[in-house]
Amino acid sequence: MNENPGGNHALHDYHIHSLFSCDSEASMEQMCVAAIQAGIPEIGFSDHFDLHPDDPFQDYLDLEAWWESFSVCKQKFSGELILRAGIEVGEPHRFAQRVNQLALEYPWDFILGSLHWVDDISVFDRSFFRSNERDSYLAYFLELERLVDEGEFDILAHFDVVKRYGYEYYGTYQPEDYHEPIRRILRRLADRGQALEINTATLRRSIQRPSPDAILLQWFREEGGRSITLGSDAHSPQEVGFGLSSMRMMVQSAGFTGLAQYENRQCTIVDFDKPGR
């Protein structure tokens, strides 16, 4: 079910997938129409770009066809919807040469950095959770720290997505139990001037909590972080914009004055009370 933010200009959805991702069947046009109907003025397409050799959909994304479709939609919905060209890169720190090449090949507005694999185990596979909670989560956060230290990206996607399925094995995790590695990651993210994404896909799962929670927003701000983006991680039109208005309020409550807007990989903070974008 979509929220209707009533045409709020200080709102965006920067994490939207289309049929160019292996796990979506929705056209870009369908997702654009859904965003307009939900009253979201700005969206970013960020289809999967997976390079891990064990990923069954490695190199699935057809970049030329993606850009052709994106250009058509950008022209078609001009005046109704701001479209940003994004891409979700899995493990950018492990495939630095290819990611650096990708960043130069096309005029991206932003690159999402995502962690889906720790060593050779997917964090969406039950085998990742065969150990105890602390070992599993520490392994994830240590790899995430390497991604933030070394990866080429603009926005860190779904910070603690490991809890999506970890919840089924361990229950709700407490970020305070991993305070030190999480703080290091957030400090490094802030030092590099990169954005933290608030992802609502986990609100649609049994855990029913965003990724990350409000406490991490507070820590990010304390560590000097300034840039926040929102993303529904939508794979179907019905999911576009899901939960984003409440996440915007959570961002405001944490003391942030606006959201990060990306264009040509340059970040601008747009205040929540700004009348237009």
Image: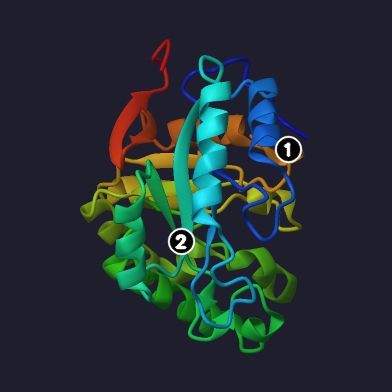
Residue 113 in picture, x, y percent from top left: 42, 59
Q: Mark 1 and mark 2: span between their CA atoms? A: 22 Å
Q: Residues within 10 Å of mark 2 (few under 14, many from 20)?
A: many
Q: Is residue 103 above or below residue 252?
A: below
Residue appearing at x 50%, y 77% in the figure: 52
Quarter of the rendering occupied by the C terminus? top left
Residue appearing at x 63%, y 30% in the figure: 32
Residue 237's label in the rendered image is 1
Residue 211 in picture, x, y percent from top left: 55, 53
Residue 89's label in the rendered image is 2
Rendered image quadrant of residue 147: bottom left
Asked which secondary structure carries label 2, the reply is strand
Looking at the image, which residue sits at the far top?
275
Rendered image quadrant of residue 171: bottom right
Asked if one can make out residue 13 in the rendered structure from this viewpoint, the answer is: no
| Residue 81 falls left or right of residue 168 | left
Asked if one can make out residue 31 in the rendered structure from this viewpoint, the answer is: yes
Q: Nearer the viewer, residue 9 or 264?
A: 264
Residue type, numbered disc 1: Pro
Residue 191 in picture, x, y percent from top left: 21, 54
Q: Earlier in the sequence, mark 1 or mark 2?
A: 2
| Residue 178 falls left or right of residue 186 | right
Q: Residues within 10 Å of mark 1 (few under 14, many from 20)?
A: many
Residue appearing at x 64%, y 38% in the figure: 28
Residue appearing at x 55%, y 31% in the figure: 72
Contact flag, marks 1 and 2 (Cβ < 8 Å) = no
Residue type, numbered disc 2: Val
Q: Is residue 56 above or below residue 261?
A: below
Asked which secondary structure carries label 1, the reply is helix
Rendered image quadrant of residue 34: top right
What is the count of numbered marks? Answer: 2
